[in-house]
């Protein structure tokens, strides 16, 4: 199952407050073909889940995952880091067999 740290949930909520989405809104996390290692992660706020999505609850935050992405997101932990090198979301994927320096591309 996909999990988000409390820090990641707080940061997503901050973004959502700025966009003022409706009550059905949530965070879509996807895996898309591309990137330097074969697959990359995508995150966006959406107004509602799509047909066929799995809707997860992460500390009260709705997370939408499509069926294609679900197979690659099992066991993934999403975190938000803030350091002198920059800030952003990070993905810890135990299923990845390789990744590249960008941190958002992986292979399986």
Image (cartoon, grey):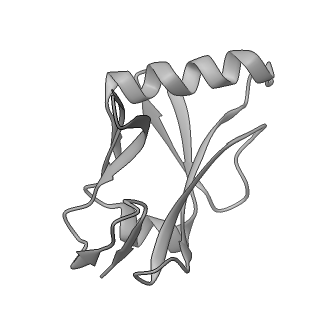
Q: Closer to the camera, 62 or 7? A: 7
Seen in the picture, residue 43 relative to 25 is either above or below; the reply is below
The residue drawn where x is 72% and y is 59% is: 51
Viewer can see residue 34: yes
- Judge from the rendering whether residue 13 lies leftward or rightward of residue 78; answer left or right: right
| Position of residue 18 measured from the top left corner of the image (x, y, whole percent) | 74, 18
Q: So how many labels did they put on this image?
A: 0
The residue drawn where x is 37% and y is 59% is: 103
| Position of residue 56 measured from the top left corner of the image (x, y, whole percent) | 47, 41
Seen in the picture, residue 94 relative to 92 is either above or below; the reply is below
Seen in the picture, residue 82 relative to 39 is either above or below; the reply is above
| Position of residue 73 measured from the top left corner of the image (x, y, whole percent) | 37, 61
Q: Closer to the camera, 51 or 40? A: 40
| Position of residue 22 measured from the top left corner of the image (x, y, whole percent) | 80, 23
Q: Closer to the camera, 38 or 58? A: 38
Residue 70: which quarter of the image? bottom left
Seen in the picture, residue 67 relative to 74 is either above or below; the reply is below
Quadrant of the frame with the C terminus: bottom left
Q: Closer to the camera, 106 or 36? A: 36
Residue 85: which quarter of the image? top left
- Judge from the rendering whether residue 13 lies leftward or rightward of residue 9; answer left or right: right
- Judge from the rendering whether residue 60 lies leftward or rightward of residue 97; answer left or right: right
The residue drawn where x is 45% and y is 33% is: 57
- Judge from the rendering whether residue 56 lies leftward or rightward of residue 64; answer left or right: left
Viewer can see residue 1: no
């Amino acid at each position: 199952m996909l999990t988000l740290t409390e820090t990641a949930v707080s940061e997503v909520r901050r973004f959502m407050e700025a966009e003022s989405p409706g009550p059905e809104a949530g965070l879509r996390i996807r895996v898309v073909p591309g990137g330097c290692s074969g697959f990359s992660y995508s995150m966006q706020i959406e107004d509602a889940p799509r047909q066929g999505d799995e809707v997860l609850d992460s500390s009260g935050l709705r997370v939408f995952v499509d069926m294609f992405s679900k197979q690659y997101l099992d066991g993934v932990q999403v975190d938000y880091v803030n350091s002198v090198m920059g800030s952003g979301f990070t993905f810890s994927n135990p299923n990845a067999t390789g990744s590249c320096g960008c941190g958002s591309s992986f292979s399986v």
